Amino acid sequence: MSKPLNGLKLVEMAGLGPAPFACYLLAGLGAEVTRIEAKGRSAVFLPLDPQTNPDVLYRNICELDLKSDEDRNAALALIQEADVLVEGFRPGVMERLGLGPDEMLQANPRLIYARMTGYGQSGPMSDRAGHDLNYISMSGVLSMIGRKDSGPVPPLNLVGDYGGGTMVLIMGILSALYAREQTGKGQVIDTSMVEGSAMLATPIFSFMASGMWRGGERGQNLLDTGCPFYDTYETADGRHVAVAPLEPQFFAALIEGLDLDRGWTQKQYDRECWDELRDLLKATFLTKSRDEWAAVFAASDACVTPVLTPQEAAIHKHNTARQSFDTVAGHIMPGLAPKFS
């Protein structure tokens, strides 16, 4: 089957986290990916099953000792034929190997040299070690995630590694490929997870600038659990529903579905009433099970949905109708998105 990136040649320098995940996604969209791994190096961190590990799926694996002239020349030969090189090492590592951007763009002027780091290629913290949690703490994003009575809550590693890292890296690669069509020249992409995660929060920074968001007050704003009609609620069976009717017409549908006093529709955005409304919603959702509430709101625009486990999501009728999940080596895995005509 033809895929949108068929014919694109990509060389990946083996690593962990956002760079290999970007290569996994690009490979799934048709790119031919060759992954260069250090010869003889055994996995010492997250030894995942290679049959289901996105770090290695869909790749051609090439083991090389880049400290030897012969293997470094083999890597150079691969890069000379590539459209894109992706590396996620600390700044300076590729240069010390003799595979830095100056040398590679001289050998292959059309090359897109895509670099993925936490803090960027320059700046006083550029050579520091870190992980997703460190990067989103430095971007200001982590401080905004959590309830009013808690400390900041790690949002898995989705915001720094995969949102501000992988997706921004892919955006850079595709943009540079388009620019190459106009100029015939490649370029270097410097992707920082600090900057990427901050960019994801641009709408929230805009809310703060307009006075709609209290930047120093976690858990007291519209989308951070401060608002009673944008939160999760426990149900009678100990599970949860997600409630998000921000617009007045959707909020009215929520009040109707819960059979509450219609007068609440006139007080939706009255912050003085939010504590009372939250207590009422908590008590009401505890009267039925999660799936009973899902049935009540199944045909409604009240923006109420069940909080599904990953296993439940994979077999939900909407997701199965769209084939949103795949089976890989007998295990459920998310399918690639978006879908193409």
Image (spheres, rainbow, N blue to C red):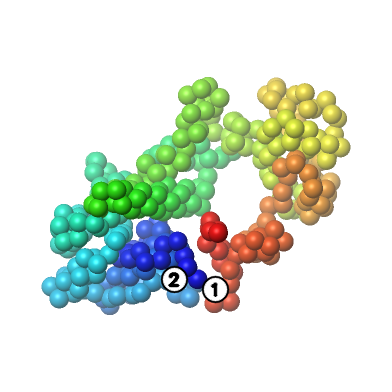
- Classify residue 321 by image quadrant: bottom right
Task: Give residue 199's position: percent from left, percent from top.
Answer: 42, 39
In the structure shown, which secondary structural element does the residue marked by tag 2 occupy? loop
Q: CA distance from mark 1 to mark 2?
A: 10 Å
Circle 2 Cα neighbour tier, 10 Å, few/some/many (<14 / 14–19 / ≥20): many
x and y percentages locating residue 193 in the rendered image: 37, 47
* Mark 1 touches mark 2? (CB < 8 Å): yes
State left or right for residue 149 relative to residue 277: left
Compared with residue 180, is residue 15 higher up or lower down, i.e. above or below? below
Front residue of 44/161: it is: 161
Rendered image: mark on residue 57: 2
Is 11 in front, or is 175? Answer: 175
Position above or below: 262 against 21: above
Tell me the SS state at disc 1. Answer: strand
Numbered badge on residue 328: 1
Residue under the point 43% across and 51% down: 167
Q: Is residue 165 left or right of residue 82?
A: right
Task: Say which quadrant the C terminus sits in.
Answer: bottom right
For marks 1 and 2, the one nearer the N-term is 2
Mark 2: which amino acid? Leu
Location of residue 80 by image quarter: bottom left
Q: Is residue 165 visible?
A: no
**Residue 107 x/y as whole percent:** 16, 61
Residue 329: x, y in percent? 54, 77
The amino acid type found where label 1 is placed reads Val
Q: Which mark is residue 304?
A: none
Left or right, residue 74 beside residue 300: left
> Mark 1 Cα within 10 Å, few/some/many (few <14, many 20+)?
some
Can residue 34 be seen here? yes
Q: Note whether 171 is above or below 47 in the view shown.
A: above
What residue lies at 24% left-to-right and 69% top-to-bottom?
78
| Residue drawn 56% across the image and 40% down it | 146
